[in-house]
């Protein structure tokens, strides 16, 4: 005899209280990051030894009528940090068994990710405004 | 159920027996995928520092550049370059696994070694280019 309630069974989410959404988001961001991280490595490699005006020139450079480098860097940062939050969540859920410590670390890694995105986007916007 | 009087008193090891098993290479690559992911997460702080320095003016950027070009800075950056190379190659394999490819034992072992050696070669090549050319956009 199953102890499961009919509602719980029809939701099909099991003891994790979540479905395949997390798995899919991790994979879709990973696929997007394959070309974006190769672009990021190429961009950073090209900027080794550059001074501040050269970095700003690179980020503000117009391609196809838009600052393509700044847009790609912004996209890379947002998608990469989202992928990071999903990945760190799995690590925490696997290794941290105390409920309080787990919830604290999940919230802390999300706060960290939000802070990184906020700081990077603010910097990108102020670069775009100044150039 | 009553306690078994024959039960040995010493603690039995719990699976997975990390200190007992011989490490198959796929186990090492799986754990390294997580470790490089955690290292890259920490590296996002340096990415934020770089952008904030660029947005804050020439002096702030020069301070970042000096730190990045120091010996500890180079060691950290090489670690991050290798971590990204490894996580990228291993991540592509994970996507292939998700599609159902590459599970045969021989394939999985060969790909594991290709990822380990390939990531080191890729990181060394990127670092050699950085040290030799000092970047390509500011010539």
Image (spheres, coloured by chain):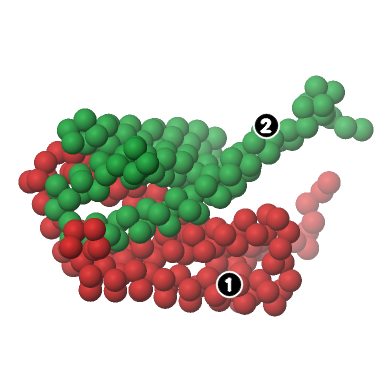
Chain colours: A green, B red
Find the distance from the CA under tag 2 to the CA under tag 1.
Answer: 33 Å
The quadrant in which residue A18 appears is top right
- Estimate how packed mark 2 is, as few (under 14), some (14 to 19) or many (20 or more) residues with alpha carbons within 10 Å: few
Residue A128's x, y, as percent? 24, 34
Say what secondary structure mark 2 lies in.
Answer: loop
**Chain identity of mark 2:** A
> Where residue B48 appears, x then y in whole percent?
28, 43
Q: Is residue B39 above or below residue B60?
A: below
Question: Is residue A90 visible to the viewer in this orientation of the structure?
Answer: no
Closest to the observer, A5 or A84: A84
Compared with A118, B68 (above or below) is below
Q: Choose top left, top right, bottom left or bottom right for residue A75.
A: top left
Viewed as shown, does residue A122 lie left or right of B14? Answer: left
- Where does residue A114 sit, x and y in percent of width and height? 38, 33
If the image is split into quadrants, where does the N terminus of chain A sit? top right
Residue B112, numbered label: 1
Q: Residue furthest top?
A: A7
Q: Chain of mark 1?
A: B
> Can you name the residue that lies furthest to the left here?
B59
Q: Residue at x 49, y 50 (%)?
A: A33
**Label of residue B28 in the image:** none
Position of A121 with respect to B86 (left or right) is left
- In the displayed structure image, the side of residue B70 where residue B5 appears, left or right: right
Instruction: Give the residue at x 43% y 57%.
Output: A38
Disc 2 target residue: A17
- Tag 1 secondary structure: helix
């Amino acid at each position: 005899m199953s102890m499961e309630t009919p509602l719980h069974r029809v939701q099909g989410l099991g003891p994790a209280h979540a479905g395949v959404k997390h798995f899919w988001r991790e994979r879709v961001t990973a696929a997007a990051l394959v070309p974006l991280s190769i672009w990021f490595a190429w961009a950073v490699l090209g900027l080794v030894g550059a001074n501040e005006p050269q970095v700003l020139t690179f980020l503000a450079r117009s391609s196809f009528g838009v600052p393509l480098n700044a847009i790609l860097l912004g996209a890379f940062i947002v998608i990469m940090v989202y992928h990071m939050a999903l990945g760190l969540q799995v690590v925490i859920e696997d290794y941290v068994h105390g409920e309080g410590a787990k919830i604290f670390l999940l919230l802390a890694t999300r706060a960290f990710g939000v802070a990184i995105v906020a700081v990077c986007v603010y910097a990108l916007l102020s670069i775009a405004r100044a150039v | 159920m009553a306690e078994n009087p024959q039960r040995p008193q010493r603690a039995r090891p719990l699976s997975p027996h990390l200190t007992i098993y011989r490490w198959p290479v796929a186990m090492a690559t799986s754990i390294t995928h997580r470790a490089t992911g955690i290292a890259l997460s920490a590296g996002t702080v340096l990415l934020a520092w770089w952008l904030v320095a660029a947005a804050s003016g020439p002096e702030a950027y020069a301070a970042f550049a000096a730190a990045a070009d120091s010996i500890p800075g180079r060691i950290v950056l090489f670690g991050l370059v290798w971590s990204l190379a490894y996580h990228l190659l291993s991540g592509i394999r994970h996507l292939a696994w998700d599609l159902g490819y590459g599970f045969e034992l021989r394939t999985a072992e060969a790909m594991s070694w290709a990822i380990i050696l390939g990531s080191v070669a890729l990181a060394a090549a990127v670092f050699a280019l950085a040290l030799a050319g000092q970047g390509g956009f500011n010539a």
